[in-house]
Amino acid sequence: METPFGHLTYCTNIHSGESWPDHFEQLRRYIPAVKAEVSPDKPFGIGLRLSNLASLELSKAPALEEFRQWLRENDCYVFTMNGFPYGGFHHERVKDQVHTPDWSTAERAAYTGRLFRILAALLPEGMEGGISTSPLSYKFWHRCEEERKSVTEGATFNMLLVVEQLIQVRRNGGPLLHLDIEPEPDGLLENSKEYLDWYFQYLLPAGVMLFTEKFGFTEEEATLAIKDHVQLCYDVCHFAVSYEDPQVVLERLQFFGLKVGKIQISAALKALLPKGGRENVIAAFRQFNEAVYLHQVIARKSDGEKIHYPDLPEALAEAGREDVEEWRAHFHVPVFTGEFGALSSTRDDISRVLARQQARPFTTHLEVETYTWEVLPPGLKQEMSASIARELHWVLQQLDIS
């Protein structure tokens, strides 16, 4: 839905269904109920997630026209998409395979290009569209620096091939479309420093060279085109797990003239670990140890040093370390509450990001992303549409919108 501070929605990766017919059935089941609760009198925006299979099926004209008709009939529109998970995302072990295939492959580029063609066909006239995507690859697949550099170069080149298509769309009178890079703990780009280093050491040099030759741009024109079409997906959960101050990150991006394509409104788990009596905290974390998604943990030691664990089991194995004062875990928990028994969440970071958006808007896309409903501990599960509506209402309250 459109608000004074941007278009607000939730990401439909919360819904199962890897084929388009199955996912469309989930949309028909839940979207009208959520819209009736949070946006009964205004068009409701959808943050669409399509697997590779679903994107192939929706690319066909009859399916696409059927969906467009459904959107019109239900007073809905699509303005953002999640292109991070390529394959299955529900009812199976995902873990690090959420990065497969990574940006070093032609498959990832083809999938993302297809998503953009679908988005361009669905996007309302005069509106910009964005697709969030993987931060190039998964860091632990590439152990040595030389290999990581090679993968980064290849991934950047494939990404620029997609950006070339987006530039051409705009030059032909089409909408502004941007690829929104989503840093994540243990991604090849996992924090703001790595994102900025990549942008200025890899993306801009290669892109300026490519687009000055391809389009006859000046260096300045090529730089501006890249900054328009490659933006940051600010996933609040991910940056919070890395202990990054939202204000510092956003000021840094503004200083370098880089844009935020989308805020993914999400919260991570966190807790202080007292030297004595931490058993209840560790027991609470164990409740969130499940086998589907990666739950990277970054521990903060008393001297400020950080310890990175690739998943919750590795952190639990070192739960007795007395030099550790705090854990933050990549588990997208509901945003409408900040307390989870002995644990709390990084929800305060959301409030700070949204306060900045109110004061000085820096994006037009806002998307709640809590995709873990199926694997939450039983006591936290509620009916799906009511839970989604509750999340959106909480965001509207933060933005002082009744």
Image (tube, grey):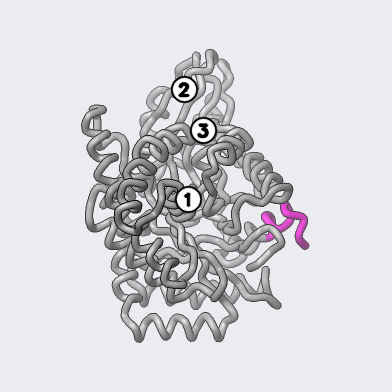
Q: Which mark is residue 178?
A: none
Left or right of 363 on screen, residue 323 = left
Q: How many marks?
A: 3
Q: Is residue 159 visible?
A: no
Q: Residue at left 70%, top 77%?
A: 41
Residue 321 image-quadrant placement: top left
Of the image marks 3 and 1, the number of the one nearer the N terminus:
1
* 352 is within the stretch colored magenta: no
Q: Secondary structure at mark 2?
A: strand
Q: Which residue is mark 1?
A: 224
Where is residue 8 drawn, in percent x and y? 61, 62
Decide: marks 2, 1 in contact (CB < 8 A)?
no
Q: Main secondary structure of the magenta part?
A: helix
Q: Residue at left 53%, top 25%?
A: 279
Q: Which mark is residue 306?
A: 2
Q: Which residues are magenta?
A: 393-402
Question: 295 or 4, which lies in front?
Answer: 4
Of the image marks 2 and 3, the number of the one nearer the N terminus:
2
Q: Residue at left 36%, top 73%?
A: 20
Where is residue 92 drawn, in percent x and y? 31, 55
Judge depth for marks 2 and 3 and give the one in front: 2
Q: Which mark is residue 328?
A: 3
Amino acid type, label 2:
Lys
Amino acid type, label 1:
Leu
Q: Is residue 371 above or below residue 62?
A: above
Q: Is residue 92 visible?
A: yes
Question: 51 or 214, which lies in front?
Answer: 214
Mark 2–mark 1 Cα distance, whole angstroms, equals: 36 Å
Mark 2: give few (<14), some (14-19) or many (20+) Cα within 10 Å: some
Left or right of 283 on screen, residue 197 = left
